[in-house]
Image (tube, grey):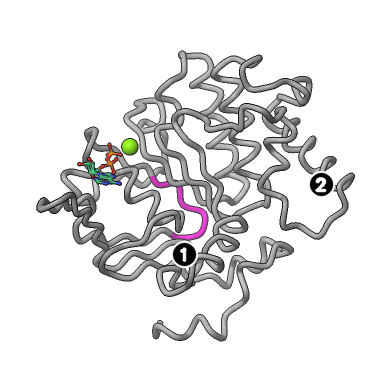
């Protein structure tokens, strides 16, 4: 596809898209020779180095690799949190690197849900308020939004903890709230950075099952992880990251 074809494409920043609209998307993610170099004084760190990757609608992608290999940096680029220093980054066919921060911020809210290793819930907000947090730009009424947020909490079996603050919840419960928050604007892509690394076996298992369920429901899931339970799943696309270089692992 020519680089400016996206101009005729559907506006994927709209928050009222149906799953049928997604069938028009060619690739959920397309990375072409992506580099991210950090400059620290006189030293250059090539955190991501010449990465090419295509993720299709419906894919479950797992990327493993040692600490420091560039996994978080790559995920941040796909999530429009960070900018590539070289190369092209398409998410839902939109070349997100070419836009200013304000476009990228609203694109991010509607297209990617982030799940972090350390949950990153806002400590002064209750569970339901954390889920409501990314919905701020929605035009729905407060009561409708609250209903949506409660449905998401039900989905992760945390509706009975809606009024709890993060410190009143276990690690696994906090991560379930974080998953509900990632789903807040029904984004087509879920990005997870070592989501089970801080969890015990049973909580980790619940998080794995939720990610698999989201993928079965049609979400693209991209996970950075060493978790054998995720790596052993059937039908995943497994890649390895080593010193910024991504290779396929079959
Ligand atoms: N903001 C930054 N400034 C400078 N160096 C960074 C920054 N973020 C990451 N790095 C470096 O880039 C490399 C890749 O880091 P990261 O993407 O966090 O790896 P991983 O998630 O696989 O552990 C590391 O050498 C790290 O120190
Ligand atoms: Mg990391």
Q: Are there few (<14), some (14-19), or many (20+) residues within 10 Å of tag 2?
A: some
Work out which residue is located at the far front of the displayed protein and give it: 41
Residue carrying label 2: 145
Q: Which residues are magenta?
A: 56-61
Q: Is mark 2 within 8 Å of ligand 2?
A: no
Mark with earlier residue (2, 1) = 1
Q: Secondary structure at mark 2?
A: helix
Residue 237: horizontal and vertical position, in percent? 36, 47
Q: Quadrant of the N terminus?
A: bottom left
Q: Nearer the viewer, residue 210 or 244?
A: 244
Looking at the image, residue 165 lies above or below residue 142: above
Which residue is painted at 16% across and 45% down in the image? 243
Residue 35 located within the stretch drawn in magenta: no
Circle 1 packing at 10 Å, graded few (<14), some (14-19), many (20+), is many
Secondary structure state at the residue bearing disc 1: strand
Q: Nearer the viewer, mark 2 or mark 1?
A: 2
- Which residue: 53% across, 70% down? 25
Tell me if I can see residue 250 in this picture.
no
Residue 153 - label: none
The C terminus, quarter of image: top left
Spatial CA distance of label 2 from label 1 is 26 Å
Does 167 appear above or below 220?
Answer: above
Question: Is 240 left or right of 229, judged from the image as shown?
Answer: left
Q: Is residue 16 left or right of residue 30?
A: right
> Residue sitting at 59 percent across and 68 percent down?
23
Task: Decide which of 99, 172 is in the foreground and name it.
Answer: 99
- The residue that disc 1 covers is 91
Q: Is residue 115 above or below residue 34?
A: above
Residue located at (22% from left, 49% from top):
47
What kind of secondary structure does the magenta stretch mostly adopt? loop
- CB contact under 8 Å: marks 2 and 1: no
Place of residue 168 in the rendered image (x, y in percent of width and height, measured from the top left): 66, 14
């Amino acid at each position: 596809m020519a680089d400016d074809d996206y101009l005729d494409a559907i506006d994927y920043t709209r928050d009222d898209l149906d799953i049928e609209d997604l069938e028009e998307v060619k690739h959920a993610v397309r990375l072409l020779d992506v580099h991210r170099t950090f400059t620290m004084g006189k030293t250059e760190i090539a955190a991501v180095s010449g990465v090419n990757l295509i993720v299709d609608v419906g894919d479950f992608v797992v990327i493993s690799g040692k600490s420091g290999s560039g996994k978080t940096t790559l995920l941040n680029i796909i999530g429009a949190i960070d900018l590539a220093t070289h190369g092209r980054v398409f998410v839902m066919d939109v070349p997100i690197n070419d836009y200013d921060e304000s476009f990228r911020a609203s694109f991010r809210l509607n297209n990617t849900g982030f799940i972090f290793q350390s949950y990153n819930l806002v400590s002064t907000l209750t569970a339901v308020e954390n889920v409501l947090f990314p919905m701020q730009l929605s035009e729905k009424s407060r009561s409708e939004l609250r209903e949506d947020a409660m449905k998401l909490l039900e989905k992760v079996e945390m509706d009975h903890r809606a009024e709890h603050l993060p410190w009143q919840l276990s690690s696994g419960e906090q991560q379930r709230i974080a998953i509900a928050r990632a789903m807040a604007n029904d984004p087509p892509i879920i990005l997870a950075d070592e989501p089970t690394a801080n969890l015990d076996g049973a909580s980790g298992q619940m998080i794995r099952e939720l990610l698999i369920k989201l993928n079965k429901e049609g979400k693209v899931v991209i996970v950075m992880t060493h978790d054998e339970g995720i790596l052993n799943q059937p039908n995943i696309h497994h890649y390895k990251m080593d010193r910024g270089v991504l290779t396929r692992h079959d």
